[in-house]
Amino acid sequence: MIEVRVAHLGLDRTTNTPVVILQEKEGERVLPIWIGPAEASAIAMELAGVKFSRPLTHDLLKQVIVGLGADLQRVMITRVKENTYFAELHIHRNDHVIQIDARPSDSIAVALRLKAPIFTQDDLLEATSVDTVGPGDATEPLDADQLKSYLETLDPEDFGKFTP
């Protein structure tokens, strides 16, 4: 297990898709994960310290974990399969450990709120060279104004369609 941190949020210029860039804490390797606009917004709001009067979904999950007397010990980015990343929330309560399958983007948003460490597998970092993400490539960091502008121009269909 390698501990990583959120280095920045970026925008893939070729697809106009948000990317969260995780970087190992004790090194230079990075792991880019393409995420949805809603999750990018949730991560960016927490990084910027933006708070709302009513809890949003990730804030609600934080309150549920804390309210149940549990602790988010870690988030694990576990694997990638067909360009889809997988993650787990490792929640401890008393002497019980609960592992919950989750999307990496949601896991990162919750980990930031609960100040929990984020880990990944060494092979995922090895598969992504430092050259994949950096100056002059397909991603660029978003500052708060760019993120606000990006979110304001989203079409509701960018979030997908609900099918009952």
Image (cartoon, rainbow, N blue to C red):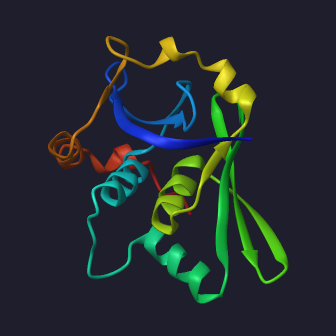
Q: Quadrant for residue 75, please give it.
A: bottom right
Q: Quadrant for residue 93, please give it.
A: bottom right
Query: Residue 62: x and y, percent?
Result: 52, 74
Foreground of the two, 104 or 150: 104
Q: Name which residue lies at 45% across and 51% down.
A: 161
Side of 57 relative to 119 (left or right): left
- Where is 85 relative to 100, above or below? above
Foreground of the two, 158 or 28: 28
Q: Name which residue lies at 55% across and 38% down.
A: 25
Side of 50 relative to 6 (left or right): left
Query: Residue 31: x and y, percent?
Result: 56, 30
Quadrant of the rendering where the C terminus is positioned: bottom right
Side of 98 relative to 83 (left or right): right
Query: Residue 78: x and y, percent?
Result: 73, 42
Q: Name which residue lies at 64% across and 35% down.
A: 84
- Where is 155 relative to 51, above or below? above
Query: Residue 42: x and y, percent?
Result: 38, 57
- Where is 34 relative to 112, above or below? above
Residue 82 seen by the camera: no
